[in-house]
Image (cartoon, rainbow, N blue to C red):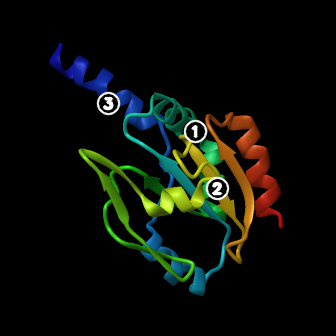
Amino acid sequence: MRIFILFLMLVPCFCLSQMKTGTFSDLETVMKKDPKPVIIHLYTDWCSVCKMEKHALNKDKEIVDLINENFYMVNFEAEKTKEKIQFQGREFEYLPNGNTGIHELALALSKNKDQPVYPLWIILDRNLNLVYYHEGLVIPEKIKQRLLEISAL
């Protein structure tokens, strides 16, 4: 019985693919070697929509493969990432606010400068120019279509 319960607990792990992700500090190095479009995904741990979206996207093997083969991806926890980040020639820091806070880079990337909307998807081309911006839940079919368009550029 214990083995059966353990098996049931592990089954979801085998069904989900995994997107390869990196960090902002890795980005500069990999872009010099092999320029690709960049996906920046801003999220928070408390965001239930972010969790639902992550599960839905990881379930879609086509999307995972498309991202892993044609893009660099940076998952960025906007309210818990506390290290300084260098990006596009600027340095960004964590801005504490009592028991919470937000990273300056999250505010810089967001169109809503007071409070970003999560999840937030930003896609940059090989030259780090903005080609896609989406606040809130993405529909797997729509993001797949957009990724195919961008990877064909």
N-terminal of the pair, mark 1 or mark 3, is 3
Q: Amino acid at mark 1?
A: Leu
Label 2, secondary structure: give it: strand
Task: Indicate left or right for 19 with 1 as reference.
Answer: right
Quadrant in which residue 127 is drawn: bottom right
Instruction: In the rendered structure, find residue 57 and report the number of the disc placed on it.
Output: 1
Image: 94 above or below 48: below
Residue visible at 43% across and 75% down in the picture: 25
Q: Residues within 10 Å of mark 3 (few under 14, many from 20)?
A: few
Label 1, secondary structure: give it: helix
Q: Residues within 10 Å of mark 2 (few under 14, many from 20)?
A: some
Point out the frontmost of discs 1 and 3.
1
Image: 131 above or below 43: below
Check the picture and name the quadrant holding the C terminus: bottom right
Q: Give the image location of residue 122, x and y in percent.
A: 64, 56
Q: Amino acid at mark 3?
A: Leu
Residue visible at 82% across and 55% down in the picture: 149
Q: Give the image location of residue 78, x and y in percent.
A: 43, 52
Task: Indicate left or right for 48 with 37 as reference.
Answer: left
How far apart are the alpha carbons under marks 1 and 3?
Answer: 19 Å
Q: Look at mark 3 in the image and give the residue it sits on.
A: 10
Task: Indicate left or right for 9 with 117 as reference.
Answer: left
Quadrant in which residue 48 is drawn: top left
Label 3, secondary structure: give it: helix
Residue situated furthest bottom in the rendering: 32
Instruction: In the rendered structure, find residue 15 and report the number of the disc placed on it.
Output: none
Q: Amino acid at mark 2?
A: Ile
Point out the frontmost of discs 2 and 3.
2
N-terminal of the pair, mark 1 or mark 2, is 1
Instruction: In the rendered structure, find residue 122 and report the number of the disc placed on it.
Output: 2
